[in-house]
Image (tube, grey):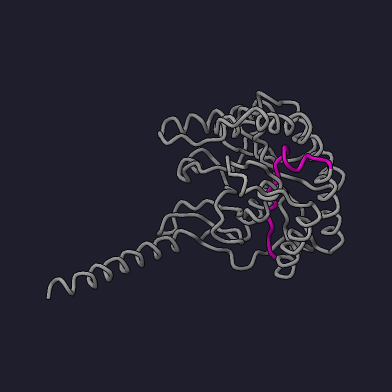
Amino acid sequence: MNTSTEPANTLDGDIAALKVLATDYNAGHRLIDKCTWPEGKRMAVNFTADFDAMLLRRLLNEPPMQLAKGEFGGRVGIWRLVELFDSHDVKATIFTPGRICELYPQGVKAASRSGHEIADHMWEHRVPKEPELERDHLRKARAAIEKLVGRRPVGTRSRHTRHLLLDEGYIYSSEDSPDHRPHYLCQPDGTRPLLNLPFHYVIDDAMFFSFAWLNSENAAQRMMDPEHVEEIWWAAFLQQYREGGYLNIVLHPFVSGRALRIAMLDRLIARMKALPGVWFPTCEQVARHLLIVHPAY
């Protein structure tokens, strides 16, 4: 008799444990149901660029051709993206590893001079597991950015610990994507909130234009026509435009810095600008607005 009831008791226990975890998870994510944008603005679009060049390729020990692809981003791609954004008066956020400030300082400074935000993207595109080393990496990246552009970063695209980011003065992250709306990541009791500006991989250029992405096999390659990607992103934009919502578009200079993709982005931005009330701020501008208008509590 005990044997027959044991599986049921175990299942009940598992379900109860999952319910507790789900409750805590939900309590730690505070959504902004309806973002209120500045007067006259219907929607916010963040154009963001992960300026990691060859750093991730090195961490994954990828072959020389992959490293060369990363080099293109630092030597050509970042300049093309800055020129594109400037031509449309779009203010972008360039998520920049600290090492990139040493490897491609002129590209980072050019983006900053044009009014684009330079934000954290880790020290060398990884977050150490050791707490003290993690803090050291975050501080070194911050110092490298501040030294180069004269201003501390206040946002990050990384998996640095939320508590550490708050302790070090960061006001937002743009990494997790549990929801399409901006939201707060916090303790289950609502304390220590950090604003998150989510993105999704379906609005990430690397998912569509990369051979051997993250050491993937040939069967997993993605190389789509820019026109096809343009329509996917346009549809995503229109869906959020109807809601008066938010869209975070993720680019990489070594991916979208190619000429045909720059041309696609040029068309896409022009289409967006043709509709009234579209706001193209930096992530910092969005964060500071939401922190005032939609505080965590």
Residue at 57%, 53% in the rendered image: 196
Residue 178 falls in image quadrant: bottom right
Return the residue nearer the eye: 291 or 206. Answer: 206
- The image shows residue 244, relative to residue 227, as above or below, that is below
Return the residue nearer the eye: 198 or 264. Answer: 264
Return the residue nearer the eye: 237 or 30. Answer: 237
Residue 247 magenta-drawn? yes
- The image shows residue 92, relative to residue 21, as above or below, that is above
On the picture, is 192 further left or further right than 177?
Answer: left
Query: Is residue 99 visible in the rendered structure shown here?
Result: yes
Residue 97 magenta-drawn? no
On the picture, is 259 further left or further right than 182?
Answer: right
Residue 79 falls in image quadrant: top right
- Residue 104 percent coordinates (x, y): 71, 26
- Residue 276 percent coordinates (x, y): 84, 64
Residue at 68%, 54% in the rendered image: 203
Furthest-front residue in this view: 219
Residue at 56%, 30% in the rendered image: 61
Q: Give the position of the N terminus as an image quadrant.
A: bottom left
Query: Is residue 285 visible in the rendered structure shown here?
Result: no
The stretch of residues the image draws in magenta is 245-259
Residue at 59%, 34% in the rendered image: 56
Return the residue nearer the eye: 4 or 263. Answer: 4
Residue 241 falls in image quadrant: bottom right
